[in-house]
């Protein structure tokens, strides 16, 4: 019984001994402040030692975490093993100078063991000037809007004016879109805001863009750099149609411009023009349409547009030529007017009866008809017979005045008036004075008269050809 109790107490003793021993996790780091610089990644290596005789898994943490990162958050820690833990310290440009206290903690996963130690970091500034902010007028943009980029520089030096070069880059998928360079002087303990405008165009692809602002000194040494982003919204199905119509007296010239006003390529599409069916015969396009159909007294013309890139414009031109139909219409109107006018004009017809032969008479008749609605006053009818024939002085109707000349004989009839729709026939006879081998052509007879308004007018008959008598 005593032997059993001795073994039990011995077991408890070793267990407590192991428990006390298991508390020992040691963090080995410099006791003096470690100097770190702003705008620079500073590495600090620590040692984590397991003074126990057990294997363990431990987690690492640091507080505050503001600009310190651990190269790993956990690790296996063997019995009596010592491992290295790296702290990546990257104080920003605007970090306050002076000594800061940070606490590193190592905690066991399987045992209730925790070790902590304080680290002292002396922060020194690499440059007294830095970027405080990058202001944008907004974060999301559409084409034709303007992005305003305003980098803000701060000089915390109390005495010195600092000259720097500021480069602002706009990147899309790591490709440079636009770049702005500024040379700036910042007074002591002052802040200066720059401003650059970037016009959003249709050719700028939609998506996320990055803005990188760098500050360098006269030796091209990087003093500070900040990054921000903005977005260009996707705009599609924005085909803008502009139509212009120019007209001359009878024709129309139509110009239609189709522009992709979005910032994405548009796929193939059809564009149509609808016109009255009557215009089909007068439609003259510069580029023939791909399709044409007639529907409900309308004709529809369609062009296949093979896609449009952002900002791209395609032009469709066509003419409506009505000049030809206007000319034809004018001619028809003139013809109709002439026909109507002719139907109301006095008419003089010259006819003959008989055949041309020596010693035989041929009767010539002049038919005068008033086809108008007014009386013809002081009517004079004249005819002429060449000297190759003679006039027989026997008249069946009104006797004319005869005037003989060397070239022939002129006959003149005087009629006081002719009433509307009235017709007068004047006749005379001729006989060839010699044997005529061919046919005899007689000239036109003349009709002279006065209208109701006292105006003198004249009309002519047609010539006639007297056929020779066949023996």
Image (cartoon, grey):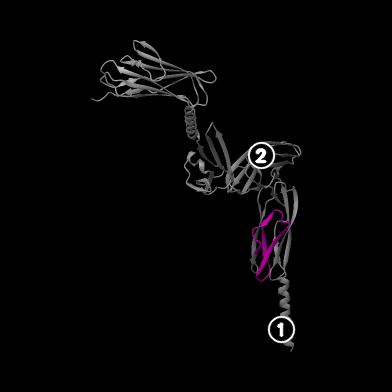
Up-down relation of residue 54 to residue 117 (above or below): below
**Residue at the image position 71 percent from the left and 74 percent from the top:** 18
> For the residues carrying marks 2 and 1, which lies nearer the camera in this image?
2
Q: Which mark is residue 46?
A: none
Label 2 sits on residue: 196
Q: CA distance from mark 2 to mark 1?
A: 84 Å
Report the magenta residues as a range.
Answer: 46-74
Q: From the image, which quarter does the N terminus lie in?
A: bottom right
Residue 85, quarter of the rendered image: bottom right
Q: Is residue 95 left or right of residue 458?
A: right
- Counting from the top left corner in percent of width and height, residue 279 is at 51, 40
Q: Element type at marker 2?
A: strand
Residue 58 colored in magenta in the image: yes
- Counting from the top left corner in percent of width and height, residue 210 is at 63, 47
Q: Is residue 354 left or right of residue 84?
A: left
Q: Name, please, the residue furthest toward the top.
A: 406
**Residue at the image position 63 percent from the left and 48 percent from the top:** 233
- Counting from the top left corner in percent of width and height, residue 114 is at 73, 66
Q: From the image, which quarter does the C terminus lie in?
A: top left
Kindly tell me whether residue 284 is visible in this rendering.
Answer: no
Residue 157 colored in magenta in the image: no
Q: Element type at marker 1?
A: helix
* Front position in the image: 455 or 34: 455
- Counting from the top left corner in percent of width and height, residue 363 is at 34, 22
């Amino acid at each position: 019984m005593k032997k059993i109790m001795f073994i039990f107490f011995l077991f408890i003793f070793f267990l407590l001994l192991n428990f006390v021993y298991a508390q020992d996790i040691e963090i080995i780091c410099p006791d003096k402040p470690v100097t770190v610089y702003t705008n620079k990644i500073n590495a600090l290596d620590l040692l984590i030692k397991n003074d126990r005789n057990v294997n363990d898994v431990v987690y690492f943490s640091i507080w505050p975490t503001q600009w310190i990162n651990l190269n790993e958050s956990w690790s296996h820690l063997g019995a009596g093993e010592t491992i290295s833990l790296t702290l990546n310290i990257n104080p920003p440009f605007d970090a306050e100078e002076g000594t800061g206290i940070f606490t590193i903690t190592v905690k066991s996963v399987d045992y209730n063991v925790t070790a902590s130690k304080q680290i002292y970091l002396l922060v020194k500034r690499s440059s007294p000037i830095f970027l405080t902010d990058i202001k944008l007028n907004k974060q999301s943009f559409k084409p034709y809007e303007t992005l305003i980029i305003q980098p803000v520089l701060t000089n915390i030096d109390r005495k010195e004016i600092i000259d720097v070069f500021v480069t602002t880059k706009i990147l899309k998928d790591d490709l440079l879109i636009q770049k702005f360079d500024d040379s700036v002087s910042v007074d002591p303990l002052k802040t200066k805001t720059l401003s650059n405008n970037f016009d959003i165009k249709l050719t700028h692809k939609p998506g996320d863009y990055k803005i990188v602002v760098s500050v360098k000194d006269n030796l091209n040494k990087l003093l500070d750099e900040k990054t921000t982003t903005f977005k260009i919204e996707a705009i599609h199905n924005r085909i803008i149609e502009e139509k212009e119509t120019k007209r001359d007296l009878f024709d129309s010239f139509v110009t239609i411009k189709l522009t992709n006003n979005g910032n994405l390529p548009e796929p193939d599409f059809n564009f149509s023009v609808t016109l009255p069916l009557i215009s089909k015969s007068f439609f003259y396009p510069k580029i023939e349409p791909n399709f044409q159909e007639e529907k409900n007294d309308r004709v529809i013309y369609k062009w296949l547009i093979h896609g449009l890139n952002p900002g791209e414009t395609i032009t469709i031109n066509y003419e409506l030529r009505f000049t030809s139909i206007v000319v034809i219409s004018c001619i028809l109107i003139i013809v109709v007017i002439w026909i109507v006018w002719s139907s109301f004009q006095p008419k003089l017809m010259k006819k003959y009866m008989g055949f041309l032969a020596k010693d035989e008479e041929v009767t010539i008749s002049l038919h005068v008809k008033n086809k108008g609605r007014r009386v013809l006053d002081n009517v004079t009818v004249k005819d002429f017979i060449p000297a190759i024939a003679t006039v027989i002085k026997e008249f069946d109707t009104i006797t004319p005045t005869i005037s003989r000349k060397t070239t022939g004989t002129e006959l003149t009839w005087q009629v006081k008036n002719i009433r509307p729709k009235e017709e007068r026939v004047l006749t005379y006879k001729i006989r060839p004075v010699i044997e005529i081998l061919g046919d005899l052509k007689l000239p036109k007879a003349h009709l002279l008269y006065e209208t109701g308004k006292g105006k003198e007018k004249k009309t002519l008959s047609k010539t006639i050809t007297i056929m020779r008598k066949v023996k």
